[in-house]
Image (spheres, rainbow, N blue to C red):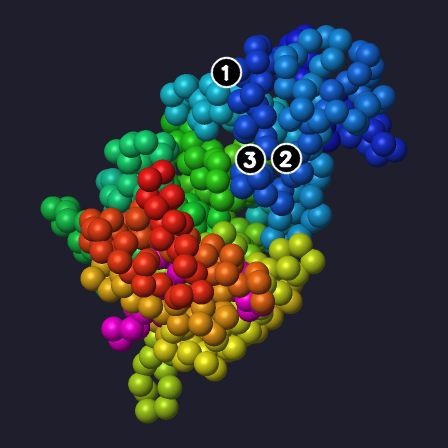
Amino acid sequence: FGVCIRSTGMELHYKTILDNEEWEVSSVEVDGLKKLRELKRVLTDENEWGDAAKVSFYRIVNNSTSKQLALTTKMSVVLTGNNEDNPLCVIVSLPTQQDHLTLRSEELLRGVKRQLENVQEHFGRPTPIDTPASLGRKSMVELQMNALVSRLDDESSSNPSLPAVLDDDSIRRLSRLTNEHQVVAFLTPVFEGILQQVPSLQVVNSEEYPWLVTTSDDSRFNQKPDNIFCHSAIYNRRNPFTTQDAQLVRLRQPTDKYGVLADWALRDSIDAIGEAKLKIDNAAFGEVINYARHVCYRTNAPKRTKVLLYDKDEFWMVRATLGEITSVIISRWDSAGSMKNLVSFFQEGRSPWVLLLVAACDRWNLEVQNDAFMGKGTFGRVFRGAYQGEGGRRTFKALKLVLPGDDGAGGLDLFREKESLVNAAKVLPNAVARVDDFHDFGNLGAALLLADLGSEVPQTQWRELFETLGALHQQNILHGDPRLANAICVQGEVRWIDFRNSVVAIDAASVTSKRRDLAILVKSCCDKLSAAMGTDIEEVVREYDGTVPSALLVYDGLHSS
């Protein structure tokens, strides 16, 4: 569908024909060049939209209609204002549907409409100024008007033999609880039993740990959802919060897990967020709407999010697309069929990163537990995995994952990285990380298993970074991106990882390419280790490989800038 920006206010138009295809078009007023630029920033953020929508900007020439769009001049060239004669048109094309991302056009339309309204009113603010109670009330009215709220209790009478989540005795015990902490503790073992039907899915208590980011400027405003439903590799463990509530202490189980999301970039791998209340009301619903909008906001955000809102009587299965609530399904805990519906809620739409992680662990018999996330790059993510060999001896390995990308490019890049590491290890086995195995999982992506699980290079060993890089260059092996983040310390030795951009230097190109490698390392060291290095780096650069006599000039230029 398309979104046409005019100065005539908000209107909705459906089924406009564009390039012989059917489009849905809406128009929204945008005042002033500043807001127009903000709109461009929000909608062109590739990381924000990812594969959910491809955004293009055009002008309508000579006041023509949407059906006669002249798709010639892009917004990036003609960002000079907005007027009736040449209104701006934003075209958002639907993605190729995937198993983990099934987006209906009306869901995307609601999400894009909200993004545009935010730009107009709050410059891309992820949540409205309304109080949670006001937001929840307004949203519920809108959802009910669009028939997006349903109760499963109305359907349970058709098959009363289907199992419920809770029996009558459990309902009676749950009804006696006096605070939300107790509700969470009571239902945690219930969730654990249900999640046995979903591979590698855990319920984590995050009640007293602020992890959900609301602003990048001040973590004090982070929010504290009650639960994270996720793979164990996605969270970092925390100790149980202290309490004087004797009933809560009795309800807690030794198997309860407490923690936070390991890294904000991993929010696209959360299966669902949980929020408990004594009684669900408009404020509670508004609170989870804000959760969904914050999780779906900006860089690396998931396109779809699920939130389980629950109290002592019922649970709400809330689904959101691009931060906009698209459906609410409500069920009582004791309704026939509620068990099946809750299991389906957790099973659907699992993150492709999680599916790939599970497949890799199954293939190599790895156990990836909490606190396993080691970092991410532009394309890949790395986790620590435990392997139990003969005699029960456990060894730790590094597992790097990449998603398929366009035409399988992600897996191909990782295969090339594996080949580069293997070839480099043949001549310099102690300068690079050792490869255990590589596997292409087809549509899921690819995984590289490294035998070396290193740690951050100590500041005192910064000279060895230059020594090992120089040794690689003497063998005409170029790393391509020799930053500190791509080096590890293994049993006291510096080894290089992430050879995705590595090549073999040939002839005259080698001097320039090696100099570029050196410049990247020098800049990275200057940014991170300037205090530890002092002026000694000048000597190290001067003594660098003789095939790069002007390396010091590279350093001087970087250092002076």
**Which contiguous range is marked in magenta?**
482-506
As for residue 490 lying within the magenta part, the answer is yes
Picture quadrant of residue 518? bottom left
Q: Earlier in the sequence, mark 1 or mark 3?
A: 3
Mark sitting on residue 45: 3
Element on which disc 3 rests: loop
Q: Position of residue 524 (x, y in %)?
A: 35, 51
Check whether the beta carbons of the residues at disc 1 and disc 3 lie within 8 A of each other. Answer: no
As for residue 273 lying within the magenta part, the answer is no
Element on which disc 2 rests: helix
Q: Which residue does the numbered mark 1 point to in the structure image?
A: 121
Q: Quadrant of the C terminus?
A: top left
Q: Which residue does the numbered mark 2 point to in the structure image?
A: 107
Residue 141 visible here: no
Q: Position of residue 391 (x, y in %)?
A: 32, 91
**Rendered position, 272 above or below 412:** above
